[in-house]
Image: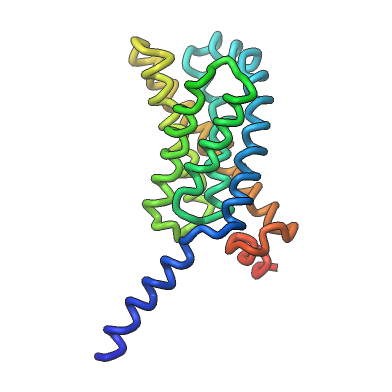
Amino acid sequence: MHDTTVLPPATTASSRGRRRWRVVDIVVASVLGVASGLLFLVWNAAYNPLSAPLELALPGLQALLGGGWLFAGVLTGLVIRKPGAALYGELLAAAVSALVGNQWGASTLLSGLVQGLGAEIVFALFLYANWRLYVAVLAGMGAGLALAVNDLIFYYAGASGTFAVIYVVAALISGALIAGLLSWLAARGLARTGALNRFASGREASARR
């Protein structure tokens, strides 16, 4: 009886400790966010020429490219594994993209906030305790859904129902594959190099060897 009253608080305290951000978490999350923001700049330039044929083939299909702006949150979440990491990584990447300059201006920050929340909510639903591939894919889809809703409200207001459905489905697919699958593979690749040995994600990779 005595043990049952003592162990749960200790377990809770340990769990809280694991979720508390360290200086190294902030530094690495910032590096990932800034690096992702620089990649966003490349994607910004490539978007128009790549999206034109997709939009011509089927309006709404251009959302298949959306995952190129969604991976920052998922990747940061997978590496840091702390509450707020996905939101921080996506928002910081969006800030870098906006500050350097792009065709969407300050609205990029809103997109980053919404997309980061989309991924963050999924990680939170799994209590920041499950980092398997399917969770990464779901987080990418969460970010993709957030992107689609944000875009349909602010960029495609008044669009037809058919366009909206195609846009949402395309964004979900893009989020699953680019932001989810590729980010999971990237996190595993980084862990194998030993660069993440101070993180649970890196120690897991070492244990598998």
Identify which residue, 67 or 110, lies in the foreground. 110
Q: Is residue 199 above or below residue 28?
A: below
Quarter of the figure with the C terminus: bottom right
By what rule are the colours in the image chosen? rainbow
Using residue 104 as the reference point, say whether residue 154 is left or right of it: left
Q: Is residue 157 above or below residue 129?
A: above
Q: Is residue 141 above or below residue 153?
A: below
Q: Residue furthest bottom?
A: 2
Query: Going 45% across and 34% down the picture, which residue do you hit?
Result: 113
Query: Going 50% across and 13% down the picture, which residue do you hit?
Result: 58
What count of labels does the image hold?
A: 0
Q: Residue furthest right?
A: 193
Query: Going 28% across and 85% down the picture, which residue do you hit?
Result: 4
Q: Is residue 203 above or below residue 74?
A: below
Identify which residue, 153 or 184, lies in the foreground. 153
Using residue 86 as the reference point, say whether residue 37 is left or right of it: right
Q: Residue furthest left?
A: 1
Expressed as whole percent of the image width and height from the top left, the position of residue 3 reads 31, 89
Expressed as whole percent of the image width and height from the top left, the position of residue 31 reads 65, 45
Query: Going 27% across and 84% down the picture, which residue do you hit?
Result: 5
Identify which residue, 27 or 167, lies in the foreground. 27
Identify which residue, 92 or 114, lies in the foreground. 92
Expressed as whole percent of the image width and height from the top left, the position of residue 59 reads 48, 12
Expressed as whole percent of the image width and height from the top left, the position of residue 54 reads 57, 15
Quarter of the figure with the N terminus: bottom left
